[in-house]
Amino acid sequence: MLTREELNVASLGEPRYDSVLNLSTTEGDGLPDYVPDETRVPLRVSIQPGFESEKDLTFERAGARARLFFDPAKCYAAIVTCGGLCPGLNNVIQSVYSELHYRYGIRKVLGVRYGFQGFDSDRGLEPVEMTPAFVEPIHNFGGSVLGSSRGHVAPELIVETLERWKIDMLFVIGGDGTLRGAHAIAGEALRRGLKISVIGIPKTIDNDILYVYKTFGFDTAVQEACKVLHCAHNEARGAPNCIGLVKVMGRDSGFIASYATLAGNVVNFTLIPEVPFKLEGEGGLLTLLAERIKGRGHAVVVVAEGAGLEHISEGEISYDASGNIQYSQMTKDVGIFLRDKMKSYFEAQKIPATIKYIDPSYIIRSVQAGASDALFCNDLGRAAVHAAMAGKTDMVVGLWYNVLTHVPLAAVVSGKKKVDPASQLWLAVTESTGQPLRFLTEDKAKGSS
Amino acid sequence: MLTREELNVASLGEPRYDSVLNLSTTEGDGLPDYVPDETRVPLRVSIQPGFESEKDLTFERAGARARLFFDPAKCYAAIVTCGGLCPGLNNVIQSVYSELHYRYGIRKVLGVRYGFQGFDSDRGLEPVEMTPAFVEPIHNFGGSVLGSSRGHVAPELIVETLERWKIDMLFVIGGDGTLRGAHAIAGEALRRGLKISVIGIPKTIDNDILYVYKTFGFDTAVQEACKVLHCAHNEARGAPNCIGLVKVMGRDSGFIASYATLAGNVVNFTLIPEVPFKLEGEGGLLTLLAERIKGRGHAVVVVAEGAGLEHISEGEISYDASGNIQYSQMTKDVGIFLRDKMKSYFEAQKIPATIKYIDPSYIIRSVQAGASDALFCNDLGRAAVHAAMAGKTDMVVGLWYNVLTHVPLAAVVSGKKKVDPASQLWLAVTESTGQPLRFLTEDKAKGSS
Amino acid sequence: MLTREELNVASLGEPRYDSVLNLSTTEGDGLPDYVPDETRVPLRVSIQPGFESEKDLTFERAGARARLFFDPAKCYAAIVTCGGLCPGLNNVIQSVYSELHYRYGIRKVLGVRYGFQGFDSDRGLEPVEMTPAFVEPIHNFGGSVLGSSRGHVAPELIVETLERWKIDMLFVIGGDGTLRGAHAIAGEALRRGLKISVIGIPKTIDNDILYVYKTFGFDTAVQEACKVLHCAHNEARGAPNCIGLVKVMGRDSGFIASYATLAGNVVNFTLIPEVPFKLEGEGGLLTLLAERIKGRGHAVVVVAEGAGLEHISEGEISYDASGNIQYSQMTKDVGIFLRDKMKSYFEAQKIPATIKYIDPSYIIRSVQAGASDALFCNDLGRAAVHAAMAGKTDMVVGLWYNVLTHVPLAAVVSGKKKVDPASQLWLAVTESTGQPLRFLTEDKAKGSS
Amino acid sequence: MLTREELNVASLGEPRYDSVLNLSTTEGDGLPDYVPDETRVPLRVSIQPGFESEKDLTFERAGARARLFFDPAKCYAAIVTCGGLCPGLNNVIQSVYSELHYRYGIRKVLGVRYGFQGFDSDRGLEPVEMTPAFVEPIHNFGGSVLGSSRGHVAPELIVETLERWKIDMLFVIGGDGTLRGAHAIAGEALRRGLKISVIGIPKTIDNDILYVYKTFGFDTAVQEACKVLHCAHNEARGAPNCIGLVKVMGRDSGFIASYATLAGNVVNFTLIPEVPFKLEGEGGLLTLLAERIKGRGHAVVVVAEGAGLEHISEGEISYDASGNIQYSQMTKDVGIFLRDKMKSYFEAQKIPATIKYIDPSYIIRSVQAGASDALFCNDLGRAAVHAAMAGKTDMVVGLWYNVLTHVPLAAVVSGKKKVDPASQLWLAVTESTGQPLRFLTEDKAKGSS
């Protein structure tokens, strides 16, 4: 279990300058206040008797600090986006730039091209020197105006480039792997005695970042996934004995599948990595599906790409440059696997069923951010800048109970957030679909025979 | 200031039956748990030194209870929607019905027609006996499938009708005025010794309900308002010296205007009821607007319908059946007022400006709920049913720091939630627009001269 | 009635250069062909016996010509957008520029700022020298990247500026008034012996351009108007005896109102300028509306802004700089007028009705073009460039029976296209709404009493 | 080449009743007219000298006839939808029903379940007796409310069922295979001396129906495909050397790929069945793609599912119940094939490229119809009913130059409409993408070496 210290945020040193933002330091004078470091957000707000021990676990609250570590007139910043696309990347870039430029008056902000690769001078990817005109329209587009990439670049090389570019603060927008990279960069800078603030902004449409309630782009991804579920529902109802099967993103966590199920209200089976399932036989997915088809004539199934891996042989799994399973490149991913299994099962059962398989793949992540994500991205960008100016480092800006927080990178990368099968969320999913709370797994099935 | 007792929820009596839901009562057994009454959510999670006194102020957490007050096999329920439309009404209706019917097995659920008027037998509005087929498609539509209405109906009459219909639990979906009505109904039932649970589900696109972080439909309304801001921006840039002026809903609170400003990132002046403004002269809106026009050639202004009332003469204000200001029926509301003022000001200044005025009015409230609202409505509906089954009454289901809560109606109707001009929210709005944190008001202006 | 000659397009002179496009001049060789001037599109394709006389009335077909009047290596072009916004303006700008730059290799294309005002050097509006980077993203935005304006600028002044800028071809994107201006410019250039091609691209969301089947932006406007009708329908069904009243654009022609009615399928009364209506008494709108309300409890009414002018007193009508009625600035336009009339009528009749009035105004014209309009705009832009390069002038690019055509400006500005009350279109509208084919007018009503 | 007679529509016999619609038979009296059979629409409106021979080829115009073959008071109708989903199916169903029920007063309209299977009593699929309440909301949904299916059912069996149900007119909504079925049904009825009108309404998002300019749903499909292209563009720009590859529907015809290319304006290579392409070597797709990647760093490729079949070995092609190639079930369809080819090619070339492959599959066909399709569907439905009531049979309702027409089924099923590589359409596509007008094919490549 986490200790109190593990939630403490690292600092480059004692702040040395008064903020230029002209906020108030007096609570209750009717003006917005600076946020003191001492303001904390509890890890667990819903407290039952017996769980008082967790009361001391709190996050530092994000916000403008009264005292700055960097002199705004003299410091330079850089922004980099890494990993796959996510709705809102451009909004975050715009927000970080705008806060740096307009509010703090930072004179130089570099946009690093194509992720960490942009720090590798061998690749010849010169950074963009950002301007108001450059960022003005970008929130109207999906994607990343800076470009992104996957794969490892040595932290030493990155820190050398940062030093050469005289960067004081680096904003790293990326997912799990990227944040590990950011943690290494912060560590390397520290080892070299460089005062470089490294601030992460967690990016993943899978929403699987530990100690972060919701990541940007997730709402938009759910909205897009939800549209696809309605398509699958129309397909399923449009043919006799028809199953609409949808694969959505979610490598380790079934958040998109779960939330889209709840938002769409048309799904009959939701399959996520956190809840294994038995395929055939009593209580198996195919058996339950056949019952549904017999009863209602159609069904909708949504599967997260990381679900059901227990059924896929190792040889068919491929890996990307970051060492993650590369679901998009697998000839037989779980969607195709289930489609084929369903087909042969129904043929064997002599039920003339059709399966309409939809893999929206990149569609749900490359669209423009919706309004609530746009707003959230703005907030994250501003909070990231406040943290950097105050000399915080080796941390991400998170969201916890609707409050923006600072979370140490070490804590964030210590694992992945998952859908808890004992949570109200999973309960709600099973209430919405009508599926059992737990599928029988192969072992349990054996046990029960 | 609120006392601890004022956040305690009323109960019809000691629960008498075991729940039929088959959840777990053992924490940590890997199964979803019933929520005990003792689980509490703090009023203020972000704690600064010196504010420990508020630590005792907590809300009861919503969720399924292990023990029920009503026998599911024998109780009847009714649902009513009141006041103006709001995205998600049908989703809430569907969710309440589904939880009652599918999870608890309630045998009869009445849908009351056209708000509280549906209880008045003189009007001949027979309630609908709801069925799965009736609710199945309704989440695909904006509006309320039951119909709604404004205006007062005597609580005595309503309670008599409830008694005649043998209703054990009433779900009231409505805004501030409606919740006052629900509070009176709960009181009247109590006076008569009737065991009727009255559960409110707060509905307002203005998001102005006290002790409720966010109401359903608000996200969708912001998304729609945001689209209109982009239209106004296109108009403003499309003509020389052009001002795009948009009026949005927000009678007492400027939440839609503020959030849409942050989401859209194209607004130059945001006017809300909570922040009065001086019109003319130094530091006045029109002067600042003229500076913007001279500098950039275009501007976007968004005004909440309740803003600037200090500038409108009493004779031009009209009132609806609930006694609220009826902004939609005013010949000269604040939008028209500002449009005309701007026009004459720029004419007087000999600046050949054009003003494109957009009043989206009902457009932002009658659309279908977006995905995040759809999901939220499902949650609210389920929580409302759990509360009623457990015998809670005279309360609403709220959201506080992402946790569903029970809040006594008395507390909820004791005031209106407003945008705090000292909050990080308003600070963010002014950072986005570039407008001053406070406009000069007429008085201050006088004082400063 | 139109003569054959009136559909002949003017030319600056005999073409002098071979085209640089490398199309084929041999029909049937499997390659796209140049379009000869002799290819014609009939005015009326649906021929009944007895209407043979119209067989000779044909339009010149648009398309790339084998011979050019201008030497691409030496000529300059300018683009101007005038009047109100319309979805697709930026797409047309982009298409004209791309065809000029990439296909014909024109070296200089000026973007005139803010409509005809941009030709007036007193205003200091320097034209933009357009580049591929300038036009690359613009089709993703509503509005006009060049800006637009209304009002008169002397043709002499415009031609002088064109001469000073050495412009050989001017693309004028605008509505009725603008095209009159373009006609005058072409005439003035001719008088001065200047070889300047003036090519109009008709722009009006009202779709009221004579001899043009459909103008760009119209489809998108109908789609947006249709969304508003669904909002009004939701509102109307959401309250007892409720009327959703929507005002849409359409000064002289009811095309938007008619098409949106057919697309939305929720309207009960469609009011357009071409079909006058009686308000009160037997067969009057209010009487029919009251019958509908009594029968069904709700109604949706859509009114074009130019409808019912016969009921509005002259003093309440205001005019813009182009001399058009300025509907957007009228305190009491037909929407407000009807809202108030309905209100007082139902009060007088003691029917407790509510009226929800929606005026989407600029919302339906400032959005981005939909896919079909985007495609159409591309076609129009290319055809306009082909016409100019071939030395055509004083004409617009139109669409007639899905074929792009050349239409002389004199013919285009000789009147306005209107909804024919005897057409299959109006018949379909009345079938969809259930309203009478003709309303009683005041006179008829008097006559019939 | 087609003869004049082949465009004549079959009739069940001389009309016997006056129409009940009360239209006018006098041209010019200001009222909508019945359409006489003699009104014709030419096959080719754009006439060049030398093509006079085609002047006699004309279609019969659709519309209400003054005289009816069936007595509205005594006839029954049935509607069936077959084949894959298409946006607008429900709108057509609603329109046919509404015209039959409200305008002609037909007393019984059966909705056949799940395509032609619904005529097979062995399957136990009872038809729905349609009502106003049944059709009222259906235009708000994608899919088909009646259900659909593929595969053969014997015409004899269908006609027997029609006779048993006493159906006088059958409306068949389906694509190429279905219309062949309808033609057989009409023939079988004729052989039995049954007076059953069989009216087809062509349905295909591929838009590949001969003698029909545009089929319903096509606009909506293009709009959805266009969204996906923008996603692919965002992906392509978001990573170094990245190719966004999109597969869209289009078995025999590349209309969706071509129109979406023109509407989206972000594609660099459009691959359609009508234009074969060489893969590798000089002038091959991969070579051109590598040049684009080297020059610009990203590319977007769209491929119709039926394109490039010449590169796929026969063993990997699968067929559906209708005998069509079942693209959706192929393990290695052209999208996957190209993705893999690109991957290995760039690896071999040592260019570190990434390929983002998107297959939207059913997404673009199962959405709700957009506004222009909604309107078009209404028109088609009405025209189909008018044709049936007048005793026409063995025909479809088509669109030709914006005019609704009657086209004999025999002519319609005599082939498939394709993108003409010599047309202005394909020229425009290549201008938009910058690709060569013709790719080198393997043979040409050999020849040129």
Image (spheres, coloured by chain):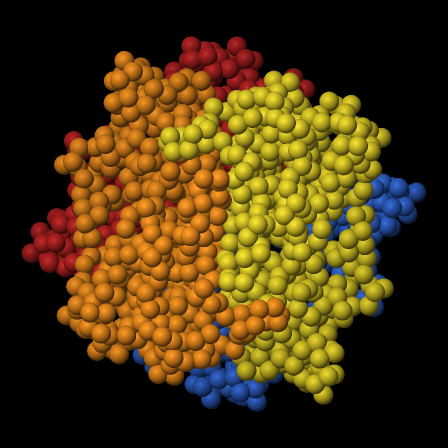
Chain colours: A orange, B yellow, C blue, D red
Judge whether D448 appears above or below C77 on screen: above
Report the front residue among C280 and A224: A224
Asked whether C26 or A339 is in front, the reply is A339
Residue C327 lies left or right of residue D440; in this view the side is right
- Kindly identify the residue that appears in the image at 68 percent across and 30 percent down: B12
Rendered-image quadrant of the C terminus of chain D: bottom left
| Numbered disc total | 0
In depth, the one of D373 and A247 nearer the eye is A247
Q: Position of residue D366 (x, y in %)?
A: 44, 37
Specify the quadrant that holds the N terminus of chain D: top left
Find residue A427 and report its image quarter. Answer: top left
Q: Residue at x 51, y 15 (%)?
A: D126
The answer to which image quadrant residue D331 occupies is top left
- Residue C134, given in percent of the width and then of the height, sits at 39, 73
C115 or B384: nearer the eye? B384
Q: Position of residue A166 (x, y in %)?
A: 26, 79
Give above or below for D207 relative to A160.
Answer: above
Find residue C104 and report its horizontal and vertical position in percent. Answer: 33, 71
- Is D27 positioned to the left or the right of A357 in the image? right
- Is residue D177 in view from this perspective? no
Instruction: Tell me which corner region of the image, top left, top right, bottom left or bottom right, holds residue B287.
Output: bottom right
Q: Residue at x 40, y 76 (%)?
A: A68
At 74% from the left and 35% from the top, the residue drawn is B186
Does D2 appear above or below C173?
above
In the orientation shown, which residue stands out farthest toward the left? Answer: D449
Residue B80 visible: yes
